[in-house]
Amino acid sequence: MPAYHVYEDSELLDYMKSGNEAAFDEIYRRHWHTLYHSAYYLLQEEAPAMDIVQDVFVWFWEHRDHLVLTTLRGYLLMAVRYKVANYFRHRKVRAAFAAETVLLAREASDHEQELELKELKAMIARFTGELPERCREVFQLSRHEHLSNREIARQLGISEKTVENQLTIALKKLRVRLGSMSLLL
């Protein structure tokens, strides 16, 4: 078995084209380091750089029968640059897809929350309409006009304790009516 480390790249390429794995191994040993540094320089990431170099060599071996090249090193470096460009292109497409997916999910979620809020408001409005008059007045002043118990008592001419009792009654009834949605309240 010949010592392949003494052969020129062109001779190793000829041996490799005929299926000689030892010639391919020598090409790999000679050029792996340079290709890795080239890929790493462009990517600044170790794992993708290693993957790209590995992909280049796998492709190189699998297509050895059809290779027509003048310089082995230049060809391999160009293949690495091409793979890096593809990596960036695919990563950019994936990032754009992910961003679009997040945006669509957020919009769907916002729309869904908006519908749930409308439904909740409609349920509360129906509920409020069914309350006794004094209880309804207290509830609306508290929840819609955001008045304090003291302000409601003063406006309606009733005690703060009556306001508290009316709100307690209204909220208990509302919780029962809404059932599982009471957690939102």
Image (tube, helix red, strand yellow):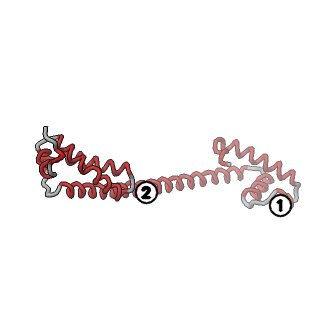
* Nearest to the observer: residue 33 or residue 18: 33
The x and y percentages for residue 32 are: 27, 49
Q: Which of marks 1 and 2 is in front?
A: 2
The x and y percentages for residue 47 are: 37, 48
The x and y percentages for residue 14 are: 11, 48
The residue at 83%/61% (across/down) is: 151
Q: Residue 93: name its quadrant.
A: bottom left
Mark 1 element type? helix
Amino acid identity at mark 2: Glu
Q: Residue 180: name its quadrant.
A: top right
Q: Residue 81: name its quadrant.
A: bottom left
Q: Residue 151 — which label?
A: 1
Q: How crowded is mark 2: few (under 14 residues within 10 Å), some or many (20 or more)?
A: few
Q: How many marks?
A: 2
Amino acid identity at mark 1: Glu
Q: In the displayed structure, does residue 104 sit left or right of residue 177? A: left
Q: In the displayed structure, does residue 120 sit left or right of residue 155? A: left
| Residue that label 2 marks | 100
* Nearest to the observer: residue 73 or residue 78: 73
Q: In the displayed structure, does residue 29 sit left or right of residue 10? A: right
Q: Does the CB distance between marks 1 and 2 fall below 8 Å?
A: no
Q: Residue 135 — which label?
A: none
Q: How far apart are marks 1 and 2 (CA)?
A: 49 Å
The residue at 75%/50% (across/down) is: 131
The residue at 88%/54% (across/down) is: 159
